[in-house]
Amino acid sequence: MNFNSIEFLALFLPITFATFYLVPLSWRLWVLSISSLIFYGVSGLEVLAAFIIAILWGYATAFLFGRWPRWLALIIAISVPMFFLIMFKYLNFILGTVQAGEQTRNYFWVFFSILLPAGISFYTFEIVSYSIDVADKKIGPERSLIRFTAFATFFPHLIAGPIMRYHDLCGQLRALQETPVLSPRLMGGLKLLSIGLFGKIFASDVCAMFIVRADSVQLDQLTGPDILTKTAFWSMQIYYDFWAYSLMAIGLGRLFCIELPVNFRQPYLSANPREFWRRWHVTLSLWLRDYVYIKMGGRERYVRNILIVFAACGLWHGAGWNFVVWGIFHGVMVIGYHFTAPYWDRLPKVLAIAVTFTLVSFAWPLFFLSLHDYAAFLGQLGHASWTSSVYQPIHWAYLALLGIVTFAFNEEKWLYNDPEKRGTVMDWPSVSALMFFVGLMFISLSRTFIYFRF
Amino acid sequence: MRAMNLTFYDRRWLIRFGIVLSVLIGFAVFSTSRLPSFREPPFDFYAMKNKDLFIAHGLTRRQEGAMKVGFAESFAPPEIGMYGNHSFQFFGADAFDKPADPSYYFNYWYANLSLPEIYRYLRHMEDAGRLPRKTILVQITTPNNDNGLHIISWGHELPPDLLFISAAGEGFFAKAWRLTGTVGVLIQNWLHEIFNYNTFILGLLQQGPDSRVIDPQTCKSPEASGDRPAWIRRLPLTVQDMFNLEGGSLFCQRRMWWRAFRRDGSNESEFADETVIQNGNALVDSHRALKTGDEVKIAEIMRAINDIGKRHGLKVVFIVPPVYETDRHDSVVNEIFNRGVALAPELTVIDHRKLNTDLSMFKRYDHPSPKYFRVVADELRKLGIVQ
């Protein structure tokens, strides 16, 4: 189920919300878990079954630590979730890379017959991080199956993050079980939900619409301005897509008294590639840092480790060489910054932000194009004329508007502000209600969130 | 709620949010409820002249279909009635070399209609005493078109009273299950209609059917006059249409004629701006809408439809059109469907799936062209079903 669907906003959410607050407190996590499984199960019973198996496996195998050798227990604990991840997400990529024949593929028809389960990369990383944290004795194994299930399934973060650690959430889940009268941040939740929905449709999806405009023209007909404009639209599309999702996730969490971390901190205001990864998909960066980078030795072999981490980051996003190259591209940028930081940091801030934004933006097309198409796309810059054939001033005006919102406003002042102390027009209930309503009315034009497919 | 404690500020904010949202949603519900039904009062296709067009531009799918149901319920039925979905939208009386005369032939095509829904449509017409007088043509969606979809799976776009009609021999639990599912889908459809900017605007502006009938020969199109100011031409078409900024008759613009109904319920293919590309459905297993065992259901529902005709001495002919694609006759959905048809050998089935590579037969990959419908008409003549 998508957050930007009528079924979710007009049926699922109100019913779940009302049930959650009407049932006795001991049932609250049951309501959250069952509704989250329904939310997920809408995509198919096979993917739901795989998800439930992964949860039960993660829960049960945590009790092996301390009884079995750590390495053995860890391998067993992460084997099933990783098996599902590899088979559902990477099998086709692996077989393609080794050029497996049709007969070999036929052995795996079960996995090929099921579409990629939504959010599999997210929930796998969460379950794996739980197992590793138990193995490292950072947390003890959770005895309550319902609490563990609620952690893994909680629908606001299930499909596209933020990637939660168990210790971040278990206290809040316990509070739901123990606090008779809850104090949800409904105002903050509904505000973020409304703005997220509105932003998804009128920023991300409008960009997507303009991108399609260029798709209707043969590549060799595109001109330099078209290529640059399309790249900028891609950049804004993915930015606002993930921005909107992250806002909706936090907003939804607040409706149920769960505070999810901010996963997206105005990344286009980053002054260097390293900062970008501290602002973009923060919880993924931290996950890779804690469970890959540091485990491999961290700064001891910096270049090797960074390249591996970013290649893994690319692969996490998608099963394709384009994603791997995208990851390595970012890795090289981070390494480049690492060795040139004294010079880079001396740049005027506006210039540093512009350079970072430009570099990041030229990598985004790899999310949407194969390596060959990406090369051809950028190669067209060298051949094209400099009069636009696809885009017109209205498109650039729209980009400029998005640019102003992206670069000129501090979200801490209008999005994550305290409305009682420093309220803005965005805190007016009528503005939120209007944005929510307009979002609902135009929801038929909306597309699935890009990060849902990861 | 007893489990919730809100601060004064939050409570006040929430009340205001709720009031504003309720008013806006109430306005959307009001606007949608103003949409003319087009079923009651019924539109009379007989009142149109031979070459007239009924402009369907701006109607919701529900209205388009309801209009035909209303006509079928209230006016004299034709000799030959065609029941199917958009695949047969260009099947007009011209295929039989006849003028568009609803007393001879009428095309009742309706978006996404499948066999169980055609059955209910016909049962409803049977109860109303409005079945065709001689022949019922039933179009079956080609299995490869949508990977088996719209054959026995429901589109749920018929008016609710038709969807609730029971099938002969339907058990209590099967019926309860089906009706529960149907109610769920109807609620979903209703929500999609309310929360839709298009229906919202249409609800405020749309008028009844009479202004929509035009004669393309005499209709003066402001497009053709070329005297529209440049600033109007630069505006989005939706805005131009909404305020009729082009002047003249809005429905005289040729771009509005796409999907316009002719007097016989079919669409004029000449106005359809469609190109033929091959069917791109990958026919993947995970999205297959027919499974092993469905062959029995296919045969059962085809027999049930045939029985309606039999009860009234009418000939029932099932037609499976081609889709434009490479040869994929051995697809799983095709084979399941073949087995279903083989289970009911007594039925008359015209199967044209093997015309899949003849480009001239298509207006779009899943919309056969008028040439194809002449082939169908010839075959019906050979079978002695039509003169």
Image (cartoon, coloured by chain):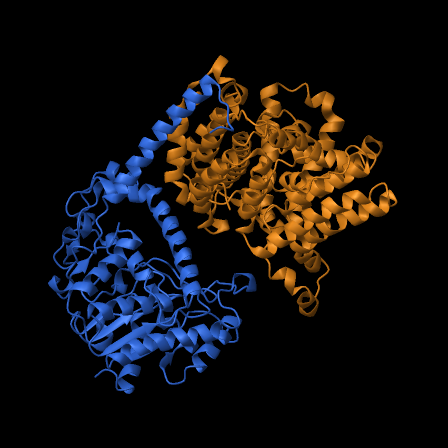
Chain B: colour as depicted: blue
Residue A163 horizontal/vertical position (percent): 65, 37
Residue A186 appears left or right of B136: right
Q: Residue furthest top?
A: A421
Closer to us: A227 or A154: A154
Q: Is residue B64 visible?
A: yes
Q: Residue furthest right?
A: A69
Residue B179 appears left or right of B205: right
Residue B296 appears left or right of B89: right
Residue B27 horizontal/vertical position (percent): 28, 35
Q: Is residue A204 visible?
A: no
Residue at horizontal 54%, vertical 38%? A238
Q: Quadrant of the C terminus of chain B?
A: bottom left
Question: Quadrant of residue A354 in the image?
Answer: top right
Closer to us: B189 or A347: B189
Q: Using the image, determine if residue A124 lies above or below residue A44.
A: above
Residue at horizontal 73%, vertical 38%? A142
Closer to us: B219 or B332: B332
In the rendered picture of this protein, how many numbered marks are placed on residues? 0
Question: Quadrant of residue B170 in the image?
Answer: bottom left
Residue at horizontal 45%, vertical 81%? B343
Residue at horizontal 35%, vertical 27%? B19
Residue A405 horizontal/vertical position (percent): 48, 26
Residue B165 horizontal/vertical position (percent): 32, 64
Q: Using the image, determine if residue B6 lies above or below residue A328.
A: above
Question: Quadrant of residue A287 in the image?
Answer: top right
Residue B312 appears left or right of B142: left
Chain letter of the orange region: A
Q: Using the image, determine if residue B126 lies above or below residue B313.
A: above
